Image (spheres, rainbow, N blue to C red):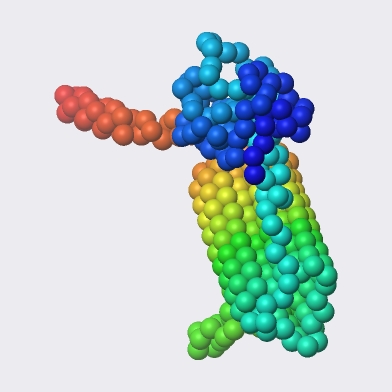
Amino acid sequence: MEFTAKAIAEFLKGEIVGNPEIKVNNVAKIEEAESGTLAFLANPKYAKYLYTTNASIVLINKDFELEKSVSTTLIKVDNAYESFAKLLELAEQAKPVKQGISSLAFIDESAKIGDGVYIAPFVYIGENTVIEDYVKLNPHVFIDDNVTVKKNSTLNSGVKVYHECVIGENCIIHAGAIIGSDGFGFAPDENNVYRKIPQLGNVIIEDNVEIGSNTTIDRATMGTTYIRKGAKLDNLIQIAHNVQIGENTVMAAQVGIAGSAKIGKDCQFGGQSAAAPHIQIADGVKVVPQAGIPNTIKEPGSVVMGSPAFNIREFQRSFIVYKQLPDLYKRVKQLENELSKLKGTE
């Protein structure tokens, strides 16, 4: 689809600087853009590309000051990054919507299927499952018995949802994610042989959650593992049994949350960070990548770093000392040698 600068500016309520009739049919990075594409500039580090880009249209912030003339058409908006995201969302919505049920899918006769659904070839839907209106199940999705998938949710290829689990409305679950696998529960007997503890709970994913590829969310031993509404989980994340992830919390790739940990709302976890079992993380906590959290964090909005993790400012002050340890060690050895010499002259 093609859009003119005028149409884009009207949609974004922006101001055009340049040719309002110029057209674009694709998007691109500002440094790699070709003619006929739209780019955006939000990060000042990329400002130099504005003067050399081949993009036909570039979104910029209204407060950006040009250092020299540009050849591209500009659209000034309040927030270039947010506006670009809106355009991408518009383009996504313009794609054809698949509907219908493939004859190559298996659907148990007890399952309830809503209106406007798309069920691709090789999908499996088990007993007493509920698939609500406009759900999209892509090839090789497995839906076990007594599962509910609510309206407008999309499960991509290879997603597995175990029995009794619930997927909320408007969720997106990416390829290979597994929802409701058994929690890691074992107990040693008198011979130190580990016996499996049955995992009798489920997973409930609330509305507007997105879960990345190959992420796993374990069912509770008893009760429920919760992913609260608006949470966003990246690829390759492990959420253990009986965990609770708060509303609008985001986690980058390779985060690990151990069993029964409770994470507050609006938290941010950097990549490869982890939380120990049975701890609580207050609302709004930010966890720096690769941090390991061994204990409860009670202070809302705090930022933690390191392993074991503690307040980022304290960590940074400690790290300055840590980097000086080799020199400090040399100085201590020098002082020891000088003391030894002094003692020898007494």
- From this view, report whether residue 173 is shown above or below residue 327: below
The front one of 190 and 145 is 145
- Asked whether residue 260 appears in the rendered view, the answer is no
Q: Where 178 falls versus 256 (above or below)?
A: below
State the count of labels.
0
Give the farthest residue toward the front: 21
**Quadrant where the C terminus lies?**
top left
Is residue 331 visible in the rendered image? The answer is yes
Q: Identify which residue is drawn at 56% across, 35% down.
A: 37
Q: Which residue is at the front of the view, 292 or 89?
A: 89
- Residue drawn at point x = 59 percent, y = 68 percent: 157
Q: Quadrant of residue 220?
A: bottom right
Q: Residue furthest top?
A: 68
Left or right: residue 328 compared with residue 80: left
Q: Is residue 284 above or below residue 130?
A: above
Q: Position of residue 87 (x, y in %)?
A: 68, 39
Image quarter hosting the N terminus? top right
Asked which quadrant contains residue 109, the reply is bottom right
User: Where's residue 219, x and y in %?
Assistant: 68, 72
Residue beneath the point at 80% across and 76% down: 113
Residue at horizontal 75 percent and vertical 52 percent from the top: 230
327 left or right of 298 in image: left
* Residue situated in front as seen by the camera: 224 or 62: 62
Give x and y (percent) for residue 251: 62, 51
Q: Locate residue 257, reporting x and y percent.
A: 61, 59
Is residue 104 or residue 49 the one in the foreground? 104
